Amino acid sequence: MTSDATTHGMAGSPRDGILDRLSDTFWRRPRLFLALLLAPPLLWLGVVYLGSLFALLVHSFFSIDEFSGLIKYELTLKSYAELFRAANFDIIVRTLTMATSVTIAAAIIAFPIAYYAARYAKGRWKAAFYIGVMLPLWSSYLVKVYAWKLVLAKEGVLSWLFSVFHMEAVLELLLATPVIGGSSLSFSYIGTFLVFVYVWLPFMILPTQAALERVPGNLLEASSDLGAKPAQTFRKVIFPLALPGMIAGSIFTFSLTMGDYIIPQIIGTSRLFIGQAVYAQQGTAGNIPLAAAFTVVPVVIMAFYLWMAKRQGAFDAI
Amino acid sequence: MTTAVLFSGVSRHFGDVRAVDNVDLSIKPGEFFAMLGPSGSGKTTCLRLIAGFDQPTAGHMEIFGETVDGVPPNRRSVNTVFQDYALFPHMNVSENVAYGLMIQGVPKDEQESRVAEALELVKLSGYGDRKPGQLSGGQRQRVALARAVINRPKVLLLDEPLGALDLKLREAMQEELKTLHRSLGITFVFVTHDQGEALSMADRVAVFNDGKIMQVASPKEIYQHPSSRFVADFVGSSNILSPEFTNSVLGQAAWASLRPEAIRIVAGGSGRISSRCVSKNYQGSTSRIALDAGGQSLTVLLHDGDESIEIGDEVALDWDADKVHIMEDQS
């Protein structure tokens, strides 16, 4: 006790432990500490992550020799031209349409849930909200997708529910709709869409709820005090302040849908989405440059989307 | 003559808590009315009832002769300056101030000229393009004020608007609010827990405690003739005389109040009572002396240049009999 007190208590006394000396050094040179703290994540992000992304970008500017099937290491835009061939362009349009629909649907479903959680839920209900939203994320993605296949199948729970309420005609009408219909829900775009919305919904709810949580209640009172009807308060105050959170959520739902290759393979038609195209091109087809070019598409679309959102002032409320 | 705001038997209960308990009140048109009380006394709830953010559990309310029972805030000609200003963070100063006009659908050019006028009124011309986050507390306060008065409300509600400002700024804003009140001629209802603020600014003051109004009167009346021990104690600085003390000195057992400045220090042996100095508090031009007169504590003001009194000294006191105010409420 006494010796401890003298060594630690007095300024300038010699320190014996290496950790003591290390912490003293860090205290004197805070920048060194920061550098050491950031070095591993920066190495990871800079070399492994950005490096691989850069390698991908470079590959998209190479091409494949049609006879030998080998990559020609010469810079060319051939792979990008390939993307605009009808068969490939269809894949892009299909994926983009799906990602947009999923994002809009997720935003519409997520908003009331997030609003309830941010404004009204307290204590135990708030905990229930978080568990309810996160619970689906705890189980395997594949399990959930296969479960949905059973739900959506021709003899599945959903068809049965429709028949219980004598609404088979509605389901048949839905499935008879051109393009989005099919032989059953699990073999239609409607099915793919439903599963995408289900799987990515938490990623929309949580950021939206976080944004709404930061809107003080008295702003809503101020708005109505100044004469605004509830709908006007929503348009002028709540929505603009929730928008940054919804954009953050849409980045998740949009890019996750754009890149996914498992859901459309298990549920839906045999027509490809970008993720599946990348998978096929780099695997069986062995066309790495085209696969790379496909992968660049979502990156470009996301960058464009964020740029537009910023220009429209979506982040002004941050 | 109509009343600006009328409460008749108004209660607001939150579960078992009676935040506002059977309040009757009438505020006159054009009056600067203060609601004073400790936190949790119901003054802010009363303000929220006038604004329409809250609905009374029982009772009836009118604003300028029109019933507002069940009328939402957006359909009341009342505007509020919030305690923490509640400025819209995603809009600049001009957009904040123009909000009410924009909602009403006032033409753009009229909006602009009225915003410029309102900003000039609160001395913030040239700040229109700033965001609330770029302003100081005092400036935000002015924006909140401009945003409310631009709508020309019949009643302006102010919820502790000066609470977050430092002393100097608060004093300056008190003056400005009074000037603004005179120039606009509208009814101001002002909530505060600061008795100095209420007494110096208001035409009339309502003192709240436990959801009830203890006294409604002019600041002078409240200060000189507090109706109950609570009011005398809360408004402060008055000596509260116990029935035992008044019985022995005046021959009448009742709670009474006596202001410090009404008490004179006289030569030993004369005067009504003798007391002992307990503590002394120097305050610049005056000193406050706390005295003990046989169990009754008394505060006396001592002016610079008066005979010096030290702790432990015997002090003889006197006052004019009519300065002792017997309280109406003896509870």
Image (spheres, helix red, strand yellow):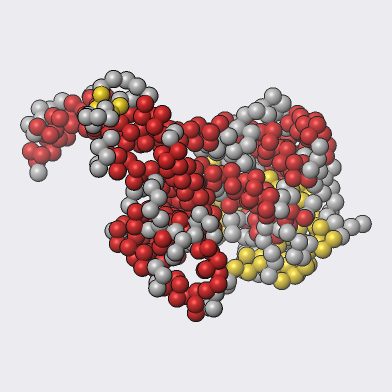
Q: Residue at x 43, y 48 (%)?
A: A253
Determine the residue located farthest toward the front in the rendered image. Answer: A67
Asked where in the image residue A71 lies, by quadrant, the reply is top left
Q: Is residue A231 visible?
A: yes
Where does residue B199 sit, x and y in percent of width and height?
A: 71, 46
Decide if residue A286 is on the left or right side of residue B62: left
Residue A135, visible in the rendered structure: no
Percent of width and height locating residue B208: 67, 59
Quadrant for residue A197, please give it.
Answer: bottom left
- The quarter of the picture where the N terminus of chain A appears is top left
**Given the current orientation, which residue lies at the most extreme right position?**
B1
- x then y, percent, for residue A174: 53, 64
Q: Residue at x 14, y 33 (%)?
A: A20
So how many labels did they put on this image?
0
Q: Which residue is depicted at the point 44% across and 64% down?
A: A183
- Pick the front one: B40 or B303: B40
In the image, taking residue A241 as reference, residue A85 lies left or right, namely: left
Q: Position of residue A5 (x, y in %)?
A: 13, 38
Q: Is residue B97 above or below residue A170?
A: above
Task: Spot the residue most to the top.
Answer: A74
Left or right placement of residue A144 versus residue A5 in this view? right
Task: Between residue A278 and residue B11, name the one nearer to us.
Answer: A278
Relative vertical location of residue A149 with respect to residue B270 in this rendering, above or below: below
- Which quadrant of the figure has residue A39? top left
